[in-house]
Image (cartoon, rainbow, N blue to C red):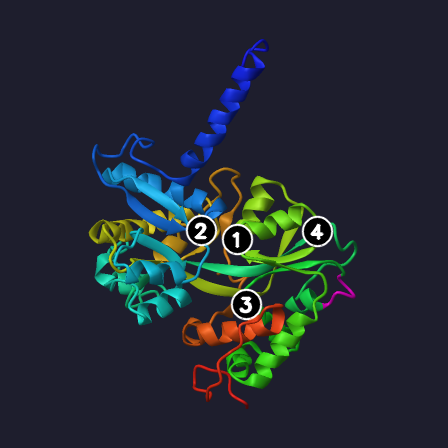
Amino acid sequence: MAPARRSTGALARLVLSLTLLAPLASATTSAQSSPHAAPGAEPLTVLSWGGSYERAQRRALFAPFTEATGVPVEVERYDGGLAALRRAVQQEQAPWDVIDMTRSEAMAACAEGLLEPLSPDIVAPAPDGTSADRDFIKGAFGPCSITHSVFATVIAYRTDAFPGRRPTEIADLFDQRRFPGPRALQRTPSVNLEWALLSYGVPREELYRLLSTRRGLSLALSRLAGLEDLRWWETGSTPPELLIDGEVVMASGYNGRFFDAMVNRDAPIAILWDGQVQEHEVWAIPRHARHAETARRFIRFATSTERQAALTRYIPYGPSRHSATERITTHADSGIDMRLHIPTHPLNAEGAITKDEAWYAKTHDRIGDYFRAALFPEPTEPTEAEPTEAEPSDE
């Protein structure tokens, strides 16, 4: 603590210095900040999602990788999308070495030639010798990506907003008579379309067939347009803040972010697991990455059983390895049993939807056009074309 007689000018200069240094300290893990970084070793640049998720990765993955290899890790912020990656590949100068991205976007990026091929051979077997192809969950290996965890997009709500009655099913998101108050949803068709059709009683197994028709898409968009006092978010850290500040009573978001707010900030919120949409999160290497071989070393390290299990001690995302799932224990700081907060736990997954990432990879641009045209004041009109299997039909 500064002495009470420190001059106002000196105190102001100190505050200014700390303000300028803080973003640098939080934005990257550099060779200077890590005692284990090898002198002169070039850093590995990882594109990740910030917030509590990045903090968990630093403790479970990035710092241990530097300690094991001497390679410092720098982290840059990612909010999804392929535009920046397309520009980097066109210029043949990718500024990142590893990207933490959703599998649907990785599939689309791979199809466009934006990612390096990734062989399953780079991952390690389980500690008991079980081969990786048997230890990883189904669909974990793509031609350009490797799944490292399963997260869920869920609805969370303020526990003090609905005295005597709380939401129990995803249809309650759209029932503003019984559950009044503003909502917050991500500014993307993904998940919102599925929830909208579920609210009509459409069976989970019929969702993507119906969304492939103009009738089904129109039903979903109409349901979303009917929500009153709706806020749209784009950054994963926003929904917990909106709930904590009381700006909304329900919000969509990532289960790990809500868990962090509940446990580390004692936020008065709860998760509605019904209708959770599960999705694979993957590691990928952009084409023209400067340190592609080091990136492969990192992916092997980060997808090991030990590191996947370690990540669950900081944030409750389901590991992609069965051997890591068996090692889930407690939260590193609070001691809470993390098994009950993992989206793939049987109690939480009863009403879950598995996102059809192949469908989204094929319909990415066109479904986005319909979504924007229906819900935002300056729409991007969809091009006129005959429907294909990757477009909504008139059925």
Q: Position of residue 231 (x, y in %)?
A: 65, 58
Residue at figure coordinates x 54%, y 55% from the top left? 255
- Kindly report the secondary structure that dominates the magenta region of the rendered protein: loop
User: Residue 282 falls in which quadrant of the image?
Assistant: bottom left
Q: Is residue 127 above or below residue 6?
A: below
The reply to whether discs 1 and 2 touch (Cβ–Cβ < 8 Å) is: yes
Q: What's the amino acid at mark 4? A: Thr
Q: Amino acid at mark 1?
A: Gly
Disc 4 residue crowd, few under 14, some 14–19, many 20+, Cα 10 Å: some
Q: CA distance from mark 2 to mark 4?
A: 27 Å
Q: Secondary structure at mark 2?
A: loop
Counting residues from the start of the chain, the first of labels 1 and 4 encountered is: 4
Gap between marks 1 and 2 measured at Cα: 8 Å
Nearest to N terminus: mark 2 or mark 3: 2
Q: CA distance from mark 4 to mark 3?
A: 23 Å
- Quadrant of the rendered structure where residue 365 is? bottom left
For the N terminus, the image quarter is: top right
Task: Specify the label residue 49 is tagged with.
Answer: 2
Whole-percent x, y for residue 7 in the image: 56, 12
Residue 159's label in the rendered image is 4
Label 1: which residue?
A: 236
The numbered dot on residue 84 is: none
Q: Closer to the N terminus: mark 4 or mark 3?
A: 4
Q: Which residues are magenta?
A: 175-179
Query: Is 169 within the magenta?
Result: no
